[in-house]
Image: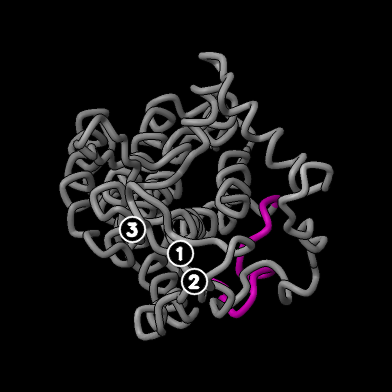
Amino acid sequence: MRRTLFFLLILSQSALAGSARQELRKHLQPAVFSVTMVMIHDVVNPPAASRFYTYCLMGAHEIVALNNKQIVAPGTFTKSINPVTVVAKDYDYQIAALYCILETGRLIIPSGYMLEEDQKKLIIALLREGYPQTVIDKSVAVAREVAGKVAADAATDGYLTLSTRLRYRPKKGDAYWYPTPPGYIEGVEPHWKTIRPMLIDSCDQFIPKPPVEFSKDSSSAFYKLVKEVYNVGQNLTEQQRFIASYWDCNPFAINTSGHMNIGFKKISPGGALDEHYRYRYCQGQPRSR
C-alpha cells in the first residue's frame, strides 16, 4: 500500500500558479473510489489492490507531470516502465488525468468493464459544468493513449503468471503458519516476490530483521510478544477496534455467529483522499472553457 499512497501524494500535489479548479476537485476522490468498488466486487487481495491502485494512478501522474515540469514523471524513476509522451494539444490535462484513472482500471482490473458507467457519468458531469465537448474528447483521447501504455507495461510485470504457479503448501508444526477456522483462508500471494520491482532494485535493499524464534516458554521473547498482542485484542476500546477494522484490508472478512459464517467484502483504506491533498491536486492553471 505504501507505494500506492506515494503516487496518491505526488498526484495530489500537482500545483501550478492560478486559482483552484473547484469543479474538477470533486471528481478526484470519486474516480479513485470507483476503482475501489470494482476491486471489492472482484474480492481483490491487498497486494493485488496495491498493484492496481499504483498503475491506475501512475497514468494520471504521467499526464500531470507532462503539464507541470515541477512534477517528476514516474517513467524517470520506476523500474522497467517506459516514459510516456503525448503530442496532443488543446486538451485539459486534469480531465485527462481523471479519466485515465478510470480507463487504466478498466483495462487492468478483471471486472474493469464495470468502470465504463463511471466514465460516462464523468463526461456527463463535465458537460453539465460547461466544458466543451471538443476539449473533453481530446482529453479522453489522451487518457486512453496513456492508459494503454501503462496497461501494456503492467502486462509485463509478472502478475499474469501468478495463477500458473503452485499454491502455497503450509508446513505442519506449531512454529509455522497454517490456515485456521472459520475461513481456512489460503496464504495470500505466496509468489509475490516474483513480481517486477517498481521503485527499488530488489528486496535485498530492505532486508528485515529475522523473526523472533518460536517458543512456548512463557519466559521467552516470542511468548511475551504473543501475549501482548492477545491482551490488547481482548481489551480493545471502541476506537481501537474501529482503527483496526479500517486498516484491515482483507477483502473478504468472515464474522462467525453460532453455526453461521457471514462474509463481508471490503477494501480499506483505499478510495479516499485527504481534503488537503485534494485541494493541492486542483491548484492547476485554469484553462479557457
Q: CA distance from mark 2 to mark 3?
A: 33 Å
Q: Which of disc 3 and disc 1 is earlier in sequence? A: 3
Q: Which mark is residue 187?
A: 1
Where residue 170 is drawn, which disc sits there? Answer: 2
The x, y position of residue 273, in whole percent, is 50, 33
Closer-to-camera residue (86/171): 171
Contact flag, marks 2 and 1 (Cβ < 8 Å):
yes
For the stretch drawn in magenta, what is the main secondary structure?
A: loop
Q: Residue at x 64, y 26 (%)?
A: 232
274 above or below 211? Answer: above
Query: In the image, which is nearer the foreground, mark 1 or mark 3?
Result: 1
Left/right of residue 187 with respect to residue 283 in the rendered view: left
Instruction: Give whichever of discs 2 and 1 has the lower sequence position.
Output: 2
Where residue 275 appears, x then y in whole percent? 53, 23
For the residue labelled by badge 2, is the local secondary structure a helix, a strand or a loop? loop
The answer to which image quadrant residue 253 occupies is: top left
Picture quadrant where residue 126 is located: top left
Q: Amino acid at mark 3?
A: Gly
Give above or below for 188 relative to 168.
above
Residue behind mark 3: 105
Q: Residue at x 25, y 41 (%)?
A: 263
Q: Nearer the viewer, mark 2 or mark 1?
A: 2
Q: Is residue 139 visible?
A: no
Extent of the magenta region: 70-85
The percent coordinates of residue 205 (x first, y second) are 80, 70
